[in-house]
Amino acid sequence: MSKSSVLSTPLWRRALQRFTASESDLAAEEAQQEAVRQGGTPCRAIPNRTRACVCGTLRSVTLRPRGGVQTLEAELFDGTGSVSLVWLGRRSIAGVEPGRRVKARGLVADDDGQRVIFNPGYELLCSESP
């Protein structure tokens, strides 16, 4: 077997990628796998104006006015991309904080180029994997 055929096998290629990948690339890959395991659709694969379930980690949670109404906005990252979760008229939600794993459902819309789910149904997930 030639050296080039050995290196072209998926197992070797994957091992080489993991060896040379950065820490952030590995974290994103793990986040993708966990999101799919929890039943989420990858953020980058969600078409606009469709109902979806997304799973990931909240990167940021902010309070800001939107149309004169206070809103709680959270950026959910799943390793493929992010979706903004926006709760209109809410100042806070217990458990919704940066670093928390969340599963959210709702209609995905486009808000100035950013994917957003307004008033999503959500479930707080355990941080540790079983």
Image (spheres, rainbow, N blue to C red):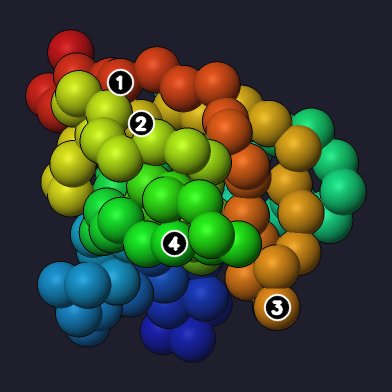
Task: Looking at the image, tell me whether mark 4 or mark 3 is earlier in sequence order.
Answer: 4
Name the foreground residue: 27 vs 53. 53
Residue for badge 1 = 124
Of helix, strand and loop, which one carries label 2? Answer: strand
Residue for badge 4 = 65
Of helix, strand and loop, which one carries label 3? Answer: loop
**Is residue 15 visible from the viewing direction of this image?**
no
Residues marked 4 and 1 touching at CB (< 8 Å): no
Q: CA distance from mark 2 to mark 4?
A: 23 Å
Query: 125 left or right of 38?
Result: left
Residue at the top extreme, as displayed: 130
Task: Looking at the image, tell me whether mark 2 or mark 1 is earlier in sequence order.
Answer: 2
Which amino acid type corresponds to the residue marked 4 in the rendered image? Answer: Pro
- Where residue 33 appears, as percent x and y from the top left, is 41, 41
Residues marked 2 and 4 touching at CB (< 8 Å): no
Residue for badge 3 = 112
Residue for badge 2 = 102
